[in-house]
Image (tube, coloured by chain):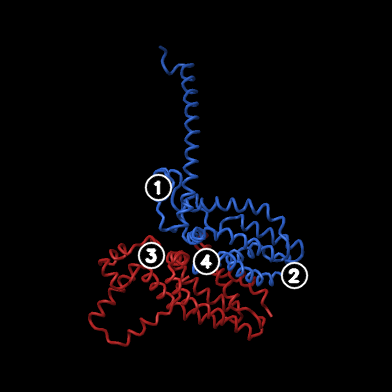
Amino acid sequence: MSFVSVNIESGSETPVKLTRRALAKQRTRERVLSAARRLFSERGYEGATIRDIAQAAGMSTGAVFASFSDKSELFDEILTADYEVIYAQMKQAAREGETVADALLGLFGVAYSFHLEQLPLLQASIAVSWTRSDAAEKRARTDIKHLFALITDALERGVQAGELKADVDAKLVAEIAWDVYVANYRRAVYDGWTVENLVAHLREQLKLILAGVRA
Amino acid sequence: MRPLGSGVRFDVLKSALRVRRGNCVGVRDEQKQATRERVLVAARDLFNETGYEETTIRAIAERAGVSVGSVFTTFASKAEVLSHVMERRLGDLYAEFDRVLPFLRGSTGDRLCSIFAIHYEFETRRVRLFLAHIAASYSPSNDPGVKPYGRNERLSDMLEQVLQEGVARGDVRGDLDLALTVEVLKACYASNYRMAAARGASAEEMSAAMDKQVALIAAGWAPR
């Protein structure tokens, strides 16, 4: 999954006073991004072409390509923006959990709440994650580390608190927890599960996963 | 000449019609079946060679040597074609499992690892096909003929049966939620295909990853 990327580049632009031309360019980017977000949500990643996106944004395909090198870059940028919105909240929620399970449920719960609001976009991002290009996959792999760090941090805190065994393979536990977290989205897609349903179910799954590593 | 509406003649006509119609349906069914077979084989190969999204119904029809129209009279959509391709492949696999299962030995964890290893071995033969199948499972199709990954009961049933036997043998605790355990195992199993998607990992590498995941989960189901 690739809704995780901290885009440092865009941050570094802000202190510089924007010229009129740069400002126009930024507006163009925003128009493209908002049109793209809508079309990806409506039609999925494959279903939305650059031409459709350009048309929806009221500009030429050439103008879109002036801002984004290809569709996958455009898609990644949308996911990155979303990720930046929720990362801090996930971190906060993980810190507030008293037990390991609560910390993990807190951070995954934030993600469920956020993504259920725009489920079609999430579905598109998961679908793409299975078939994307090598370059896009590498980008996503690097990005996903930030989230994994939140999970392993919570597990390490559990070790320090004496809740989990000292020799726990935190990376392995994080992997399994992540796998079930992602797989559960199918329940939202097919069975109309709410955030509460998902979190309650994940709680049971985590109990099962953590059973073997408790101190 | 008697009018058509009267007795005998009408009955004769009706039965003649019935016979003819019966024959027609038989031939048509056979043709439909043959078209179906050819479409499924062509689609299986194209999905794996060029990718699911990149493969059009037209390309499938061309490879199968049938008309585009006849693909659409057999299947409602490309999603349905993929679903049937997968279901048929799995039919062969599970027939094999029916023979293998009674011979599995070792702990419950070992047995499960063997089952997953056989799956990885089987699916990596046409890995892009399987990746497309998982990807599609997050984007539901409304076509009634589509059965997404994760909704195939046979894998779940098999895993649950192995766990059940483990409970009976005493190496799995009796109060374990078997369905939930199966679900967690299946999530790991599917997710390991990312290794194949990202860097062409072999069946052995995926099996090794799965072995570790099963071992961790198994540590939690050991009777206390």
Q: Position of residue B165 (x, y in %)?
A: 73, 60
Give the numbered dot on residue A40. Answer: 3
Q: What residue type is labelled 3?
A: Phe
- Label 4: chain letter: B
Dot placed on the residue nearer the N-terminal end, 4 or 2: 4
Q: Where is residue A165 in the image (x, y as percent from the top left)?
A: 67, 81
Residue for badge 4: B196
| Between B185 and B193, the one nearer to me in the picture | B193
Q: Position of residue A127 (x, y in %)?
A: 46, 64
Q: Is residue A6 above or below residue A192?
A: below
Q: Which amino acid does label 4 sit on?
A: Ala
Q: In this view, does A180 lie above or below B154?
A: below
- Label 3: chain letter: A
Residue at horizontal 46 percent and vertical 60 percent from the top: B139
Residue for badge 1: B62
| Between B21 and B38, the one nearer to me in the picture | B38
Q: How far apart are marks 1 and 3 (CA)?
A: 30 Å
Residue at horizontal 48 percent and vertical 62 percent from the top: B135
Give the numbered dot on residue B223. Answer: 2
Q: Distance between the residues labelled 2 and 3?
A: 48 Å
Q: Distance between the residues labelled 4 and 1?
A: 29 Å
Q: Is mark 4 on a helix, strand or loop?
A: helix
Label 3 crowd (10 A; few <14 / some 14-19 / many >=20): many
Residue B213 in view of the camera: yes
- Label 2: chain letter: B
Q: In the figure, what tint was chain A given?
A: red
Foreground mark, 4 or 2, reads: 4
Which chain corresponds to the colour blue?
Answer: B
